[in-house]
Image (cartoon, grey):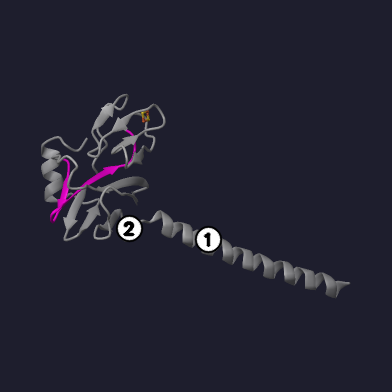
Amino acid sequence: MAVEKERRDFLGMALGGFTALGAVAALGAAKRTWDPLPSVKAAGFTTIDLTEMQPNQLAVEKWRGKPIFVLKKTKDMKEDPRDVVVGSDRYFVAIGLCTHLGCIPAYYPDKLKFICACHGGQFDTSGRVLKTPPPSPLVIPPFKIEGTKIVLGEEGPEYKEMKSKNLIA
Ligand code: FES
């Protein structure tokens, strides 16, 4: 009887172990899906490699617990002084929280706009308000350009210039 119970305990533990391993593997796969761009996170900084970005495909990164939108603009998209220029490419980079009450707007590549499901606010591909209630554009996080990478959390010269022109939000 005791032997049978021990056997059951052992099988239970073994099965539990396999289940835990499966859960970890599934979490790993999900994490890879959430991380669309190669990025390195360290001590409040997130470094994003922009080389793999496709035009008009939104990437969502994370910086200090906030979602960060990175959108490589197509050549047809309107230029904006809020564009982050890296080489010959232009990017829209912003904290992905609606400036009304903080919901996360969704990007519609076919409509070239962000729509906030909470109260219907809309933003263009430069984060500027197309439709209220959001009172101001999506906020550009502090950034620094390093070659083909963008470092979030550090104020580079491009960010400082935008800030001096009141373009951040
Ligand atoms: Fe986005 Fe209200 S939170 S429109």
Question: Is 7 a magenta residue?
Answer: no
Image quadrant in which you'd find residue 145: bottom left
The amino acid sitting under disc 2 is: Leu
Height in image: 119 above or below 24?
above
Q: Residue at x 32, y 37 (%)?
A: 114
List the single residue furthest toward the right: 1
Q: Residue at x 13, y 56 (%)?
A: 87
Q: Is residue 59 left or right of residue 1?
A: left
- How crowded pointer 2 is (Cα within 10 Å; few <14, some 14-19, many 20+) is rated as some
Question: Is 94 a magenta residue?
Answer: yes
- Give yes or no for contact between labels 1 and 2 (Cβ–Cβ under 8 Å): no
Q: Is residue 27 left or right of residue 37?
A: right
- How crowded pointer 1 is (Cα within 10 Å; few <14, some 14-19, many 20+) is rated as few
What is the secondary structure assignment of the residue under circle 2? loop
Height in image: 95 above or below 147?
above
Residue 98 drawn at (x, y percent): 33, 34
Q: CA distance from mark 1 to mark 2?
A: 19 Å
Label ID, residue 130: none
Residue 152 drawn at (x, y percent): 25, 51
Label ID, residue 26: 1
Q: Give the labeled residue for mark 2.
A: 37
Q: Quadrant of the C terminus?
A: top left
- Quadrant of the rendered image holding ligand 1: top left
Height in image: 65 above or below 27?
above
Disc 1 within 8 angstroms of ligand 1 (CB): no
Q: Earlier in the sequence, mark 1 or mark 2?
A: 1
Q: Residue at x 57, y 61 (%)?
A: 23
Image quadrant in which you'd find residue 103: top left
What is the secondary structure assignment of the residue under circle 1? helix
**What range is drawn magenta here?**
82-98
